[in-house]
RNA sequence: GUGGAUGUAGCUUAGCUGGUUAAAGCGCCAGUUUGUGGCACUGGAGACCGUGGGUUCGAAUCCCACCUUCCACCCCA
């Protein structure tokens, strides 16, 4: 029979890998906690309109990358392509704006985009994201960037470049778009086809076109930063000053535009050279207009999202060391039926005390059991056979040093083994 | 969505001017050692050679389609 395989662009996270996931997730949760963010979990699927309105009708994500289908009730459903929309929806739906500002939330969630898969680009991928509502102050921008920066530091990720830009408010952006349009129209003949079509729709996108000719034309294009209104300009200056004040290095990159419509003012990316064509591991910015757009009252907000698969790719490329998973503390090898049953009981009571213990579960010979104990990295082994059951004495072997220690196997009133202690001192060594 | 490459045991690979039972290392299981792992030795299981068609007396090997993965574009995390 033919095996059914995982869908294109999806992957299984096997036990041998999940330790790494848990390790980075633990750091993320810890840092989020320290920075005052509480976890929010929103559904994996939402009303399709939610993403059309928030991410933007004209964006690539909405136009060609969403997993959209009709459910049995005739509703148009979409699997979340990103985490901000659902968070904003929940923020409004549950009146979280009544809580003391700022409202700060984080999430770890799978996201779905119908893309052609390649390394670091999957159809199901995972994001760690944070959203912050209610602060218009530049220190919020700087603080959020500092949070991401600190997270990478805590994860021992190196060689990341932080790029920042300001795309202004809708007012300055409109003026800038006009200027860009005028400039690129002059050089229309040198632009690639897609860029010519972008001219009318979204001239800012021409700026990050990878086509060498377009890139060359873009070099001489007007600078968004020169078109910022005084307020936006001041905001950007203060964001930079905030980063400077905590010693975070950044590069101003006017080509960062971001593909989601909701961004305003500050936008930023953390990029890595260890990701191939997918250089962005973390991206975010301010989205002051989104909450209002979604039916709330005007609320300044900002956030970022980090791709966990990409993060793990970088960490692997950089050979970042992960903590060793906890090894088995005691493996009880048994000889004979009676001993096997007793080993099972001792292991059970150790596990009740949250001690990682194991015994034979597949009927191996003693020799094979010892080999197995070695393979699972058991720290100590105890051999249990008729002799030990009768005498109440045994030997515990330290698997690292080979050292053997004589122990007493104490029985309780019902004649069951209750504890293991060394002969010399009467101290319990295991439990 | 466009272009280019790729696909042989769980993993890494050999075999590919078409020719009998597809090979190795690692890993897995067992034994050497019915009472003590790591080393060594011996044996075993495990592959519809990505899938489906075609050419041929004969296909892992040649041709076509599809799928997967990878690379670039596009886009983004």
Image: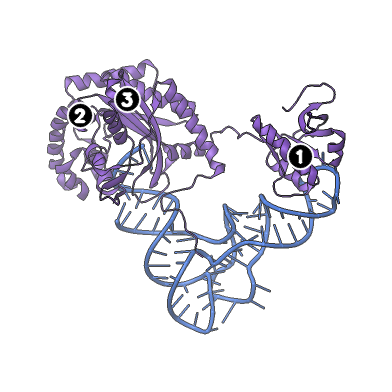
Chain colours: A purple, B blue
Q: Earlier in the sequence, mark 1 or mark 3?
A: 3
* Side of A367 where B64 appears, left or right: left
Dots 1 and 2 on the same chain: yes
Q: What residue is shown with label 3? A: A132
Q: Which residue occupies the foreground of this view, A411 or A339?
A: A411
Residue at figure coordinates x 53%, y 34% from the top left: A320
Instruction: Classify mark 3: helix, strand or loop.
Output: strand
Instruction: Classify mark 2: helix, strand or loop.
Output: helix
State the CA–CA distance, disc 1 to disc 3.
56 Å
Residue at figure coordinates x 70%, y 49% from the top left: A362
State the CA–CA distance, disc 1 to disc 2.
67 Å
Q: Identify whether A155 is placed above or below A61.
A: above
Q: What residue is shown with label 1? A: A342
Instruction: Classify mark 1: helix, strand or loop.
Output: helix
Q: Which residue occupies the foreground of this view, B61 or A301?
A: A301
Q: Quadrant of the C terminus of chain A?
A: top right
Q: Which residue occupies the foreground of this view, A270 or A344?
A: A344
Residue A177 is situated, as x and y percent measured from the top left of the image, at: 15, 35
Q: Which residue occupies the foreground of this view, A166 or B9?
A: B9
Residue B58 is situated, as x and y percent measured from the top left of the image, at: 54, 79
State the CA–CA distance, disc 2 to disc 3.
15 Å
Local packing at callout 3 (Cα closer than 10 Å; few below 14, some 14-19, many 20+) is: many
Q: What residue is shown with label 2? A: A292
Q: Earlier in the sequence, mark 1 or mark 2?
A: 2
């Amino acid at each position: 029979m033919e095996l059914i395989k995982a869908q294109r662009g999806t992957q299984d996270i096997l036990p041998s890998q999940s330790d790494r996931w848990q390790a980075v997730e633990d750091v993320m949760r810890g840092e989020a906690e320290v920075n005052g963010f509480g976890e929010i979990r929103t559904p994996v699927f939402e009303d399709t309109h939610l993403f059309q309105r928030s991410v933007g009708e004209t964006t690539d994500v909405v136009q060609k990358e969403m997993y959209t289908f009709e459910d049995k009730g005739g509703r148009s459903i979409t699997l979340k392509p990103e985490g901000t929309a659902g968070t904003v929806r929940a923020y409004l739906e549950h009146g979280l704006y009544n809580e003391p500002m700022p409202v700060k939330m984080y999430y770890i969630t799978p996201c779905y985009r119908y893309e052609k898969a390649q390394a670091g680009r999957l159809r199901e991928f995972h994001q760690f994201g944070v959203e912050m509502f209610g602060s218009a102050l530049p220190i919020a921008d700087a603080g959020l960037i500092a949070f991401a920066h600190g997270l990478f530091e805590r994860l021992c990720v190196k060689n990341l470049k932080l790029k920042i830009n300001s795309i202004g408010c809708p007012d300055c952006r409109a003026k800038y778009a006009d200027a860009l349009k005028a400039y690129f129209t002059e050089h229309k003949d040198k632009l690639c086809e897609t860029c010519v079509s972008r001219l009318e729709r979204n001239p800012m996108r021409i700026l990050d076109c990878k086509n060498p000719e377009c890139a060359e034309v873009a070099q001489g294009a007007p600078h968004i930063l020169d078109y910022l209104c005084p307020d936006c300009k001041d905001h950007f200056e203060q964001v930079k000053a905030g980063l400077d004040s905590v010693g975070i290095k950044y590069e101003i990159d006017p080509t960062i535009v971001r593909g989601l419509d909701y961004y305003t003012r500050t936008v930023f990316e953390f990029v890595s050279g260890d990701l191939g064509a997918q250089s962005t591991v973390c991206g975010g910015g301010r989205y002051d207009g989104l909450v209002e757009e979604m039916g709330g009252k005007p609320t300044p907000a900002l956030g970022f999202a980090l791709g966990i698969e990409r993060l793990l790719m970088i960490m692997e490329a950089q050979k970042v060391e992960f903590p060793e998973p906890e090894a088995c503390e005691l493996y009880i090898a048994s000889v004979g039926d009676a001993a096997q049953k007793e080993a099972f009981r001792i292991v059970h009571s150790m596990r009740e005390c949250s001690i990682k213990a194991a015994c034979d579960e597949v009927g191996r010979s003693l020799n094979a059991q010892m080999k197995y104990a070695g393979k699972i990295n058991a720290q100590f082994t105890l051999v249990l056979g008729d002799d030990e059951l009768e005498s109440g004495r045994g030997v515990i072997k330290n698997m690292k040093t080979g050292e053997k220690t004589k122990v007493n196997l104490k029985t309780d009133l019902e004649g069951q083994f209750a504890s293991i202690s060394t002969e010399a001192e009467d101290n319990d060594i295991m439990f």
